[in-house]
Amino acid sequence: KLVKIDVDRNPGFAGQLRVQSIPTVYAFVNGQPVDGFMGAKPESEVKAFVDRLAKPPGEAELEEILAMAKESLELGDLGGAAQAFAEALQLAPDNVKALGGLARVYLSGGDAERAREIADMAPADAKDPDLESVRAALALADSAPPLEEAAPFEARLAKDDNDHEARFELAKALAGAGRFEEAADHLLTIVARDRAWNDEAARKQLLTVFEAAGPMSDVAKQGRRRLSSILFS
């Protein structure tokens, strides 16, 4: 319900609400003021104000917590991110963004099994960048040879720099260990030299590496530019 009050005719209201300038807008829930603003605002800000109020109870708080968690994660504060994502899950246990974020925290901290457990709590068809990134990284790790067993591939490359199979297996090992930038470099080298090699295996693996690194990561953004340059040169 929208109510307009003439403060000149109703000075008592103005005093109670501490109105200092006109216009002043207050939003009430159950008779109590919960938000407001003073001064003229552009339509976009007024709409955002109304949209925020229209959200179900707790949703605005959840979004704020998720934003804080995401910021902590991007800054490398894994402890702060884990705490915030866990708090979000207390409010919404099935929230895909919180599950994906928490899974990414565990993966970044080296606990792949716990990351897998968290990721498995979300529906298989759930769409969330962090969740998809974690699942791609786990898939790479599952299919990769252990990095400590990659020495033979490096030795083969030292003898023959065009040994695509050795380079590909080395890239898989690097990707499985989370060293996405190095893996991408090797895969881009294969694509540049023979893009059709092994039914375009290098290009296909490269896309999975980009997904695992995260769509907004430097690895993905710079790698996609390099890939486009190779494919369309």
Image (cartoon, grey):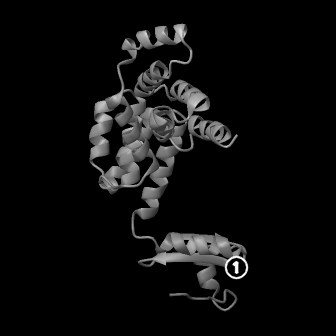
The image quadrant of residue 104 is: top left
Can you see residue 201? yes
Can you see residue 111? no
On screen, 169 above or below 229? above
- Residue 212 percent location from the top left of the image: 45, 38
Q: Is residue 83 shown left or right of residue 232? A: left
Residue at 67% from the left image edge and 86% from the top image edge? 7
Q: Is residue 129 shown left or right of residue 45? A: left
In front: 196, or 4? 196
In front: 15, or 3? 3
The image quadrant of residue 83 is: top left
Q: Amino acid at mark 1?
A: Pro
**Which residue is denoted by mark 1 in the rendering?**
23
Residue at 55% from the left image edge and 28% from the top image edge? 190
Task: Specify the farthest residue to the bottom.
Answer: 9
Residue at 37% from the left image edge and 13% from the top image edge? 149
- Residue 153 percent location from the top left of the image: 44, 14
In front: 127, or 56? 127
In front: 178, or 96? 178
- Residue 188 percent location from the top left of the image: 58, 30
Q: How many marks?
A: 1
At numbered mark 1, what does the secondary structure look like: helix, strand or loop?
loop
Bin the neighbour count of mark 1 within 10 Å (Cα to Cα): few under 14, some 14-19, many 20 and up: few
Quarter that holds the C terminus? top right
On screen, 189 above or below 105? above
Q: Is residue 19 shown left or right of residue 53? A: right
Residue at 32% from the left image edge and 44% from the top image edge? 119
- Residue 192 percent location from the top left of the image: 61, 31
